[in-house]
Each structure stands twice: as C-alpha cells, then as structure tokens.
Image (cartoon, rainbow, N blue to C red):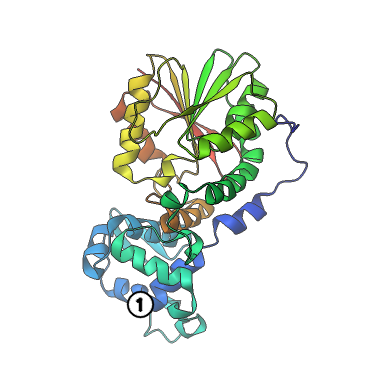
Amino acid sequence: MDDLTAAPATDPTPIYRSRDELFADDMFIAALKGFDFFSWLDTTPSSVEGIASHFGFHARPVDVMTTLFVARGLLERRGDVLHLTALAREHLVSWSPWFLGPYFPKVTDRQIAIDLLEILRTDRPANYSSRKDTADWHKAMETEAFAQEFIAAMDCRGQLAAQALAKRIDLRKRRRLLDIAGGSGIYACSLAAHFPELAASVLEKPPVDRIALRGIERRGFGSRIDVVASDMLTDPLPAGYDVHLWSNVLHDWDVPIVRQLLAASAAALAPGGAIVIHDAFLNADKTGPAQIAAYSVLLMHVTQGRCFSVAEMAGWLAEAGFSAPIEVPSAVGRSALIAKKI
C-alpha cells in the first residue's frame, strides 16, 4: 500500500515543467508563423477583445495566448492594452533586421500549432493530444479505456501534489469531505491519511466512479472513503459535508460553468463550511508564473477552460457567498485557495 504521507527525496518540478509547457512553443509558432501576430501588434497595440475582433478569434484563447507572451517577456500590459516589449519588437517583427521568423518551423509542420489556430477561431477543444482516433477530452472521458489512461496520468501527478497539499492545510476540525470530480481518489485518500478523523466521498460520473472505487480500495481506504456517482454539471451537490475539494477541476471549464460550480458548493455547504480549490493559478495581474501560463495553453487545447488568476477566482468566490480566500502553496507551482461559506 502506498505511503500517502511521504514526500519524494528530490524535487521533480523541472520534470513537471516539461509536461506543463509542452504546447506553449506551438502557441508561439502559431502566432508568429500563422498570422504574424507580433508585426501586427507593433503597429496596433490592442486589448484582448481588440485582438479577437481584428483576427476573428475568440476571447478565451486570445487571453491564454497573450498571458503566455506576457509571462515570457514578449508583451506587456498597460492597463488593458497589450504592447510589444523591446525584445519582441527587435526579434519578432517582420521588418526588423533581427527578425527570427525564418528560424522557426511552419505551422503546417506542427499539428498542435494547427489545432491551436483552429481553437483561436472556434473556441472548441481539439482532440486529446491531437489524436485522430480520439474525441476531445470531455467526450473521451465517457469511454472506460480512455478514462483509465487519463486517470492514471492524474493519479501519478496527485501522488506528489496531494501529500503536499495535505501537509499545508488544516482539516483537523472537519469531519466529512466531498472530493468533487476526484478522479482516482488520490486527494481524498491522502487527506484521509493525514487527518485520521476525516471521512470522505469522491463524486464522479460513470465510468470514472468505478475507477475511483478501485483506486480507493487498492490504497486501503474503503472503510473511510466512498464514491458518489453523480454529474456535477447537472445534479445538485449532496448535502452533509463540511468541506468541498475542487482539485484540478475548475480549470477544465469556462467562466460560466466555474461560477455555476462555485454556486453549487455554496448551496450545499452550511455557513462555516470550507471550500478548497487546488489548482494552477496565475498571479493576480496575470503576468505569470511562466510555467502556469504555459500550462494554460495545454488546457486551452484540450478543455473548455484555462488557468485562472487568484484575483479572478477570489471574485467568483465572493459572488457565490464565500469569504476572501487564503492561498496556500502545495507543490510544482500549484496552490490552494481556501475560503468559508458566509
């Protein structure tokens, strides 16, 4: 049985960054070679909405793209208006003598870049990892074979992040936790391992509910953690829990659904109940961290969501009826926002 209280002896953050930043260079190639973005912005500094309007793009992917370029030192924000930095003006504008455009591959040589251009135009997720035989992530998760593959990936990531989270938050006064869209149950199991008085339920829709049950039993927590088969998007969240955990869930959805899900937590929790949102957050002014801005591109490719800033999430929590959140770091650039139902 896994020791869910143990941490690794070495820091795997550089390896995590390889995965998190996998699609970011394709976003750069798409902008540089697909529509000469930096040359246009040099003559026409603009807002996210202005960029989307000019190119016929959607605001969500443009926000992700420009946040990446701000985090990488290629753009800077002056209020809502984006401008090139000196670095981008000298090396990414087509009429500069130091233009580096020819050094980069064509978009047609990079399938992910092709997909990202299409997402800018349509705001619809691509097939998972650009596979031709697999639907986008949301649809693919309805098949057990793909769900097992994806949950295994999230489980090995959670092995590190869950114990780090458990060591940094205090649930000693909490008795029942609802781990919403909890995947394999790795977070619920790790929190249960750290807080012996805590019982938990993992809420998942089929077929992931069966995968979660097997994972919980394999780890020896079957007597303390059960599985609730439910669809968080269509069903009310069950009552009777004093803490809700949303770990790496809200980033899969666009703003209207994020607000819907936070409101569902507020409806199900009694006053004083806690909400823990564990995720990859951008800083309040959306200038970084660079790893998270890059990860947001990966999310944009495969889901309807993106990485949100701490300020954005705090605003939606307040709107739903929660207190101002406290941010607690966990591991590999992730953190938790913890708030209470007012």
What quarter of the picture does the C terminus occupy? Answer: top left
Q: How many marks?
A: 1
Q: Is residue 115 above or below residue 194?
A: below
- For residue 140, above or below residue 309: below
Tell me which amino acid carries mark 1. Asp
Left or right, 1 with respect to 17, comes to right
Q: Which residue is mark 1?
A: 36
Q: Is residue 45 left or right of residue 155?
A: left
Tell whether 148 sits left or right of 57. Answer: right
Q: Is residue 44 above or below residue 254?
A: below
Q: Residues within 10 Å of mark 1 (few under 14, many from 20)?
A: some
Q: Choose between 28 and 179: the one closer to the eye.
A: 179
Observer able to see residue 88: no
Q: Of helix, strand and loop, which one carries label 1?
A: loop
- Tell me if I can see residue 242 in this picture: yes
- Give x and y (percent) for residue 323: 37, 23
On screen, residue 194 above or below 108: above
Q: Quadrant of the N terminus?
A: top right
Image x and y of residue 116, in percent = 40, 66
Q: Along the line of sight, which residue is nearer the eye, 164 or 119?
A: 119
User: Which residue corresponds to the image point at 52% horizontal and 39% vertical from the top-left?
Assistant: 208
Residue shown at 37% from the left, 34% from the top: 314
Give the percent coordinates (x, y) of residue 248.
49, 41
**Residue placed at 32% from the left, 28% from the top?**
263
At which x and y percent is residue 226? 56, 23
